[in-house]
Image (spheres, helix red, strand yellow):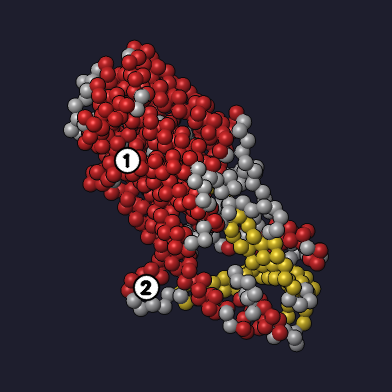
């Protein structure tokens, strides 16, 4: 069984993290300050400029630096991060089924809103950069959408090569991006150093006291500065915590602060020319090279949420919130680096559809930020519940609770965007939550139906073997996969009924997936003997571990001397396959059953998932009414 190793905090790992993780939050200066200073019903005076600049800087400090890199990223599930990994920890440690059920619903909403944002981010990021061509030549405007489509299509085609290779490709580009962004901000800051006063949070208080409504509405734009925060956490499994934190503290955070201060200084000097402060910082002769660099950086911004969506969907499948999809591991040394072809295709189609439908970043601006704000709020809530469950009343608990109150203000401000575009990520999230709800509902009903069917005494392993007393044994080893302890799988019963024979060695294998991402190497297996040559085996694995059944059999053989003669290379495998069949006549229930049956068919063949040799694998199936 392959074991996962954490990525070292080497220079290469830091550069790789820069090339994958920080694209979204790193390109936020392109549109964040523009959105904030163009807040409706405002007078662009010194108080507003200083106050909103201070809001942006302190949002980065509190939400990303304190909440994510200091608190949340320490709450990892065996090195794996993200909302669902955090929920997996809670499900392991909480004794209250009611708390787990409520948090499961919240986790589904949070994961769905993250995936909704993952569809919008590539579209709005790439469009906002390519639209910079219009500032150089308005005649290039008709080429914006075709160029964006080509760039995005190429990006999704690159995903099969893995985040490690993509990170090595994109990392140096992001270093150049952050150096240039910091340089542009510094050149403006030197000319108007008084903007450094915005580092003091008293300007936020001043703005709230004197212009409360403007300050509240401005939060809807300020939140764009932290939209990539959840991607940091979700992508933690790809690179590890240390490279991401080092890259943030040493490169990304300083560059962003300097650039936002520079944009604030630019607006202080020319408040009547604040349509797009970022591009105002760029000298005319450097516009085209900067458009190229910004386009490359926004491609990387898209990469952050795309790789995050792979992690989220994979975690959801292992935790039973979505069907299992085909997973391809793109790294030989880090099994957390994964590629899901089905997710890549679905996200690509959705993103390209948005680009061709809305055709400009301005049309998508109000749709941006609401979904990830919901995700951050839910992640923080589950973190607090986890800490309360563990009775950890540390200062970090109260800091996180305070930041949650701030995030609720961000959420309230973003609700104003629903009529003008915020409905889009919410609509995507509703569809995804519905799918998750139907899958978990159907999976429970299927499991209950199987348990009911298997609960009778004649379906026990011992009863099945009793029926074979007059049968005979043939040379060789056979492995029968099962889902229930003590129950003879369908394949075993069929073999006895039809052939009246069994192999000399019979292994009845049950793989139990833990809510923990990675389990310790010892104490993983349990073996129970049911008669001469018949062994019931339970193998426990973490939900993010890579394994194949032949590898599990080899590991069990090495740990248990009574199985020393078993050879996975010559063993035959028997799968017991069940397919859902709806039986309800009620319209609503029938539709849920039909959707679940369709979702059930999305998964890849179980033999492929379990790494079974096709020439030595038999599948025995039947329908299960639920």
Q: Secondary structure at mark 1?
A: helix
Task: Give residue 407's position: percent from left, percent from top.
Answer: 36, 42
* Residue sitting at x 62%, y 51%: 518
* Residue sitting at x 35%, y 52%: 428
Q: Is any part of residue 546 visible from this angle?
A: no
Label drawn at residue 31: none
Q: Which residue is mark 2?
A: 590
Q: Which residue is mark 1?
A: 410
* Nearer the camera: disc 2 or disc 1: 1
Q: Is any part of residue 61 visible from this angle?
A: yes
Left or right, residue 40 beside residue 397: left
Task: Give residue 549's position: percent from left, percent from top.
Answer: 67, 60
Please tell me in which quadrant of the rendered image residue 441 appears.
bottom left
* Residue sitting at x 46%, y 52%: 385
Left or right, residue 409 beside residue 80: left
Task: Give residue 208's position: percent from left, percent from top.
Answer: 25, 32
Left or right, residue 372 beside residue 531: left
Q: CA distance from mark 2 to mark 1?
A: 40 Å
Please tell me in which quadrant of the rendered image residue 486 appears.
bottom right
Identify whether 274 is placed above or below 378.
above
């Amino acid at each position: 069984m392959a074991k996962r190793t954490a990525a070292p905090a080497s220079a290469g790992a830091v550069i790789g993290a820069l090339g994958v993780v920080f694209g979204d939050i790193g390109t936020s200066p392109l549109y964040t300050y523009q959105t904030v200073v163009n807040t409706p019903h405002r007078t662009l005076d010194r108080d507003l400029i200083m106050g909103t600049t201070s809001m942006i800087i302190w949002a980065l400090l509190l939400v990303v630096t304190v909440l994510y890199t200091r608190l949340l990223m320490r709450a990892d599930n065996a090195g794996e991060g993200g909302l669902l990994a955090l929920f997996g920890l809670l499900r392991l440690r909480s004794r209250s089924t009611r708390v787990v059920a409520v948090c499961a619903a919240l986790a589904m909403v949070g994961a769905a809103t993250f995936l909704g944002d993952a569809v919008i981010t590539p579209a709005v990021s790439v469009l906002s950069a390519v639209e910079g061509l219009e500032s150089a030549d308005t005649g290039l405007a008709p080429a914006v959408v075709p160029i964006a489509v080509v760039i995005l299509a190429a990006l999704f085609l690159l995903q099969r090569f893995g985040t490690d290779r993509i990170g090595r490709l994109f990392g140096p580009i992001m270093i150049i991006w952050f150096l240039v962004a910091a340089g542009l901000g510094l050149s403006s800051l030197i000319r108007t150093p008084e903007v450094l006063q915005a580092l003091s949070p008293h300007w936020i208080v001043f703005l709230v006291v004197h212009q409360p409504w403007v300050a509240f509405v401005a939060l809807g734009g300020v939140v764009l500065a932290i939209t990539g925060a959840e991607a940091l956490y979700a992508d933690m499994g790809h690179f590890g915590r240390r490279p991401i934190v080092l890259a943030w503290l040493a490169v990304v955070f300083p560059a962003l602060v300097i650039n936002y201060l520079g944009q604030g200084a630019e607006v202080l000097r020319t408040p009547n020319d604040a349509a797009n402060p970022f591009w105002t910082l760029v000298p005319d002769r450097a516009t085209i090279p900067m458009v190229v660099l910004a386009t490359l950086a926004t491609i990387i911004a898209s990469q952050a949420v795309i790789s995050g969506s792979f992690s989220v969907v994979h975690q959801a499948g292992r935790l039973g919130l979505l069907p299992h999809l085909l997973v391809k591991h793109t790294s030989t040394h880090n099994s957390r680096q994964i590629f899901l072809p089905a997710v890549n295709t679905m996200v690509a189609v959705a993103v390209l559809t948005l680009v061709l439908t809305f055709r400009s970043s301005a049309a998508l601006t109000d749709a941006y930020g609401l979904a990830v704000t919901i995700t951050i709020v839910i992640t923080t809530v589950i973190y607090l519940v986890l800490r309360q469950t563990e009775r950890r009343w540390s200062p970090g608990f109260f800091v996180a609770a305070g930041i949650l109150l701030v995030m609720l203000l961000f959420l309230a401000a973003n609700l104003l965007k629903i009529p003008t575009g915020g409905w889009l990520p919410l609509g995507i999230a509703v569809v995804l939550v519905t799918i998750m709800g139907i899958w978990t509902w159907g999976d429970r009903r299927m499991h209950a139906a199987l348990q009911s069917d298997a609960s009778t005494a004649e379906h026990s392993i011992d009863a099945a073997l009793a029926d074979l007393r007059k049968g005979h044994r043939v040379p060789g080893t056979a492995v029968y996969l099962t889902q229930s302890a003590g129950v003879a799988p369908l394949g075993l019963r069929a073999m006895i009924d039809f052939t009246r024979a069994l192999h000399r060695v019979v292994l009845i294998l049950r793989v139990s997936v833990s809510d923990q991402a990675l389990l310790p190497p010892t104490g993983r297996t349990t073996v129970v003997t049911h008669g001469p040559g018949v062994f019931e085996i339970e193998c426990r694995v973490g939900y993010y571990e890579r394994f194949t059944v032949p590898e599990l059999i080899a590991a069990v053989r090495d740990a248990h001397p009574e199985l020393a003669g078993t050879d996975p290379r010559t063993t035959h495998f028997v799968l017991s396959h069940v397919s859902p069949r709806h039986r309800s006549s009620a319209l609503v229930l029938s539709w849920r059953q039909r959707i679940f049956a369709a979702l059930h068919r999305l998964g890849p063949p179980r033999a492929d998932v379990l790494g079974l040799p096709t020439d030595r694998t038999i599948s025995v199936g039947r329908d299960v009414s639920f």
